[in-house]
Image: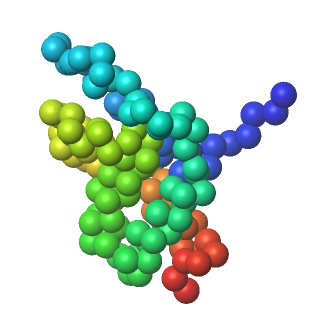
């Protein structure tokens, strides 16, 4: 069986999953808060996520450092909410988690370059700005 290299988006999602899995569980959480909402599907539409990310890229046509830095938190937020659902925003550490992931990506030169490559890849996607 061949193992293909992860796409930029898949690598970012894997990083976000890893960061969230390292978080200690909170005492006092109820079973209800850890389960998916009724009717939520385990399988998410990757195409929908890609369209959302292309739309974000459209809002930031410049590839300068300031644009990339302001795009990063919105990207991470979009991916987290796609992966874990909007109920994640109710988690008491939501903002801390989001900030830590954004800072970790910005602090690591290889992650930073991977993010820029992902943005460039999405710019070349059909429907992306020219």
Task: Write the residue at 75% across / 34% down.
Answer: 3
Q: Is 94 placed above or below 45 here?
A: above
Residue 33 in percent (x, y) is at: 28, 25
Q: Quadrant of the C terminus?
A: bottom right
Task: Give the number of callouts.
Answer: 0
Mark yes or no: residue 15 visible. no
Of all residues, the one furthest to the top in this rendering is 27
Q: How is the image coloured?
A: rainbow
Of all residues, the one furthest to the front in this rendering is 38
Q: Quadrant of the N terminus?
A: top right
Residue 121 in percent (x, y) is at: 57, 66
Task: Write the residue at 81% across / 33% down.
Answer: 2
Q: Is residue 105 left or right of residue 103?
A: right
Q: Quadrant of residue 35?
A: top left
Of all residues, the one furthest to the right in this rendering is 1
Q: Is residue 78 left or right of residue 120?
A: left
**Of residues 27 and 74, the one drawn nearer to the viewer in this rendering:** 27
Q: Is residue 69 left or right of residue 5?
A: left
Q: Is 82 placed above or below 124 here?
A: above
Residue 47 in percent (x, y) is at: 60, 57
**Of residues 14 and 110, the one drawn nearer to the viewer in this rendering:** 14
Task: Write the residue at 45% across / 56% down.
Answer: 115
Mark yes or no: residue 123 visible. yes
Q: Is residue 75 left or right of residue 39?
A: left
Q: Is 24 placed above or below 120 here?
A: above
Task: Write the residue at 21% across / 18% down.
Answer: 29
Residue 26 in percent (x, y) is at: 20, 18
């Amino acid at each position: 069986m061949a193992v293909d290299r992860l796409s930029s988006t898949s690598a970012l999602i894997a990083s976000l999953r890893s960061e969230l899995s390292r978080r200690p569980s909170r005492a006092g959480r109820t079973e209800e808060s850890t389960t998916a909402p009724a009717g939520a599907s385990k399988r998410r539409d990757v195409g929908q996520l890609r369209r959302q990310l292309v739309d974000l890229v459209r809002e930031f046509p410049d590839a300068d450092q300031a644009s990339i830095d302001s795009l990063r938190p919105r990207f991470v937020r979009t991916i987290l909410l796609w992966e874990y659902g909007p109920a994640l925003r109710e988690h008491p550490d939501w903002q801390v988690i989001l900030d830590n992931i954004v800072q970790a990506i910005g602090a690591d030169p290889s992650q930073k370059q991977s993010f820029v490559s992902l943005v460039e890849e999405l710019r070349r996607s059909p429907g992306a700005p020219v």
